[in-house]
Amino acid sequence: MSGRQPQRRTQKDAIRQGALNEVVRPRPLRRASVEAAAAGHSGAQRYTAEDLLDKVEELCSTGEFELTVSFCDKALEMMPESARALEYKAIALQELGRMDEAGEALQQAISIEPDTGPTKFMYLGQLTGGEDAVAAFTEAIRIMVGHLETLSSDGAAAAVEEAPDVDERAALVRDISSAFCSVAEIYLTDLCDDEGAEQACLDCLERALQYNPQCPQAMQTMASVSLSLQQPDSAMDWMQQSMALWHNGAPGEAGGAEVDSGANQEVSYDFRINSAKILLELNQHDIAAEVLEQLLLEDAEVVEVWYLLGLAQKFGDAADTLSTLCRTKLLYALTESTQEGILTHVDSLLEEYPPDDVGENMEFVARTLGPAAEAMVAGES
C-alpha cells in the first residue's frame, strides 16, 4: 500500500474512530491539573484511572501521543488489568513509530479481553503481516459479526421504539466489510504466492460486498485484482463503481452494477493515492490528475502525490510536467523522504529535458518553496 512521507492519518483513522466511539466521552479536566495527574503529582483533587482514560480520548484525537502514553501508564498503575488503557497506549505507540511496544500492549489487552473489543485485533492485524495478520483480522470479524447478530436478534424481538440503533448497525456493517477488505489485501500482497491466494482474496471481497454493497474499498481492491489478472475492462468497471461513491466524475462511461450517484462517501487520503495509481495504470490520466490535485489542496507537501501528478501530466503540457517534477525533487529533499524509487525515476525523467530548462524551473519552484529550497538549488548550481 501507499507509503506517504511524512506519516499522516491513514485508513487506521476509521478503525480508531470506531474504537473511540466505544468509550465514554471525556469529563473535562483543567490542562495543568491533567498533566500533573499524568505525572503522578498529588493535588487538591485526586483523579481515578477512569478520569485519566477519559482524557486519553481527547489526547489521541488531537495527536498528543507522548502525553497519551503517560496517561495510560499512570492509569495502568492504578488499574493493571485495563484493556482499554492498553489499547489506547498501543494506538499512541503505533503513531510514535514504536511498533514492537505497540504490539506488546495489544497482546496484553487481548489476553485480558480475548472475546470482546474488535479494534485491538484490527490494530494487531496492521502491525503484523501474513498469516498472523489474517488471523487477527479474522478474529475481529468474528467478534463484530457476533455483535451484529445480537443487535439483529434484539431488534427482531423488541418493539419498534426499542429497536437497536440504526447508526450503530450501519457502522458495524461498514467495519466488517473493511476488515474483509484488509484480509483481501494481505492475500493480494504478503500471501500472493500462496496456493489458493487469488481465490481467497476474491472470496473476502465478495463477503465485503455482501455486508456492504456500496463499499468503495472493496470495489477498488477488485480493480487491483482485475489488473493483476490482466483484465483492464473489469478493472475499469470496478473503478467506475467505486469512484461514483466518492468522486464527482468517474472514469469513462458509467457501467456495471447500479450505485448511488451522490458521491458523498468519505475515503482516506491514502485510499485516493491508490485510486490515482490504478487510474494511471488504466491510462485515465485526466481523472488521475483531478484526484491528485484535490489531494494537494488538502496537503501540498506529500512527495508521492506530486510525483504521481507529474506522471499524469506527462501526457499533457510538457511545461507543467517539468515544473511538477522539479517540485517533487525539491520536496523530496526538504521533507527528507526515504522513497528512493521516486527520486531515481524523477531524475531519469528530468534527463529528458534540456538542462537549462531544468535549472530555470528549479530556481522558480525553489522561490515558491522558500529560503531552504533556494539555498539548496544555489548550492547545486
Image (tube, grey):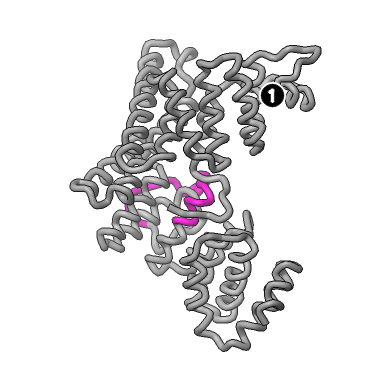
Image quarter in which the C terminus is found: bottom right
Q: Is residue 266 magenta?
A: yes
Depth check: 311 or 190 in front? 190
Residue type of the residue flagged with mark 1: Ala
Q: Is residue 102 magenta?
A: no
Image position, residue 61 (x, y; %): 63, 35
Residue 43 lies in quadrant: top right
Q: Residue at x 46, y 23 (%)?
A: 109
Height in image: 14 above or below 30?
below
Vertical side of 267 occupied by 114: above or below: above
The residue at the point 30 percent across, 63 percent down is 232
* Residue position marked by numbered label 1 in the rendering: 38
Q: Secondary structure at mark 1?
A: helix
How many marks the image carries: the answer is: 1
**Residue drawn at point x = 62 percent, y = 86 percent:** 357
Q: Position of residue 283 (x, y in %)?
A: 40, 69
Position of 53 with respect to 339 (left or right) is: right
On screen, residue 145 above or below 260: above
Q: In the depicted view, which residue is nearer to us: 140 or 90?
A: 90
Q: Is residue 328 left or right of residue 222?
A: right
Give neighbour class at mark 1: few <14, some 14-19, many 20+ (Cα, 10 Å).
some
Front residue of 336 and 63 = 336
Q: Position of residue 198 (x, y in %)?
A: 23, 49
Q: Please tell me whether the stretch drawn in magenta is mainly helix, strand or loop.
A: loop
Q: Which residues are magenta?
A: 255-274
Direction from residue 311 to residue 181 in the image, left or right: left
Q: What is the x, y in percent for residue 48? A: 66, 13
**Residue at 62 percent of width and 88 percent of height:** 356
